[in-house]
Amino acid sequence: VAFLLTDTQIIDDKWLVYINDTLSSGIVPDLFAPEDLEGICMSLRSAAKAEGIGDSLTELMDYFITRVRRNLHMILCFSPVGDVMRQRCRRFPGLINCTEIDWFHPWPREALESVAERFISKMPIFKAMPELLPSVSSHMAEVHLSVEKESEIYLQREKRYFYTTPKSFLELIAFYKTLYKENEENINKQVERLEKGIAVLTSTGSKVSELQDDLKRSMKIVEEKKILAAAAIRKAAEKKSIVETEQKMVDEEAAKAAVIQNEANEFETKCKDDLAKVKPSLDAAQDAVDCLDIKQIQIFKAFPNPPPGTPLVTDAVAYLLGKDQIRPWSPGWRSGKKLLQQPGPLIQELKAFDGRVIPEDRVAKPP
């Protein structure tokens, strides 16, 4: 079993206490409860006996630690940049004394080119054009090596370190792939946009040609319409004199109509004045009709000698209601009593009678 841990994953240095104990002694103190340790030792008794180890608790515990050391491999990836690694090695000596240190030296140009080819060879562009792969990988290696040279110059000039590691080269490759993908997407969008634009231009060109043909046909129709319009203008000019003559006649008739209209307005005004004069009487008559009662008419009909003027009223009512046209009518109280024989229908007729619309022959004085 391999346990891999990088320095960037160490959030708290307390973690290194347990790692230092594991490297130094093979076990973390107080990691297991006593009953758990006894169970572990008992489970290893058969394997220990097969290897010729005694069955005492101490010997079984040593056998357990030996097996842990044999099967658990700890891989620590620390960067020597800065003071962090130096301080950790001083505080936790197991990181130096109980490990084998592998120093990763700068990669040569051949290694850089090989790594670059391996990571970018699966890109679509290099599958389509494999002849570009060596040039691009060589350029990546040259960029990385040139940065190393400039770092040395920077150290001599400014007395400050700038580190370039194989991880930096891998980040350069990843950045190249990301940048290539972004540019490829932008280029594809532009290509798609241009293709749409070309398609639109092609479609527009065909439509323009169709419109030109339609315009030519329309121009022919316009010329024909111009000829017809010129003929119509000539006819209109010929009819213009006739229209002017008729217009004069119309103006004369309009003047006559205006005179008639004025006379009608004057007559209307006079009628309104007359209506205003008689409207109080009409309203009073309407109020009097609304006050009529059947019992009162029956009592009034029984009078042998009615009040003066009563026969005149009954004659006028019979005349306005047209009773004289139904049967011969002789003025006087005798005919008036006949009119009052059916007071109910008579009241309904009087209420339904419109005093504003009286026939002209009823307005004239009866013979």
Image: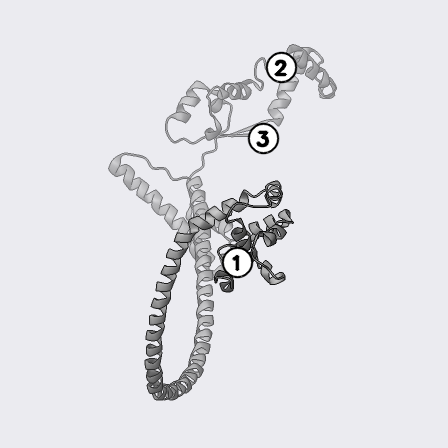
The one of 143 and 208 positioned closer to us in this rendering:
208
Spot occupied by residue 82 in the image (x, y as percentages of width and height)? 37, 29
- Give the CA distance from mark 3 to mark 1: 37 Å
Spot occupied by residue 197 in the image (x, y as percentages of width and height)? 44, 65
Residue at the disc numbered 3? 2
Amino acid at circle 3: Ala
Residue found at the very far left of the displayed protein: 157
Mark 2 surroundings: few (<14), some (14-19) or many (≥20) residues within 10 A: few
The one of 38 and 296 positioned closer to us in this rendering:
296
Spot occupied by residue 81 in the image (x, y as percentages of width and height)? 38, 31
Q: Quadrant of residue 226?
A: bottom left
Rendered view: 24 above or below 109: above
Which sits earlier in the primary sequence, circle 3 or circle 1? 3
- Count of marks placed on residues: 3
The residue at 50%/18% (across/down) is 17
Mark 1 surroundings: few (<14), some (14-19) or many (≥20) residues within 10 A: few
Q: In front of the other: label 2 or label 3? A: 2
Residue found at the very far front of the displayed protein: 305
Which sits earlier in the primary sequence, circle 2 or circle 3? 3
The residue at 57%/46% (across/down) is 305
Q: Does residue 177 appear in the picture of this structure?
A: no
Spot occupied by residue 291 in the image (x, y as percentages of width and height)? 54, 42
Q: In which quarter of the image is residue 297?
A: top right
The one of 172 and 25 positioned closer to us in this rendering:
172
The one of 186 and 128 positioned closer to us in this rendering:
186
- Label 1 residue SS: helix
- Marking on residue 127: 1
* Contact, mark 2 vs mark 3 (Cβ under 8 Å): no
Q: In front of the other: label 3 or label 1? A: 1
Amino acid at circle 1: Lys
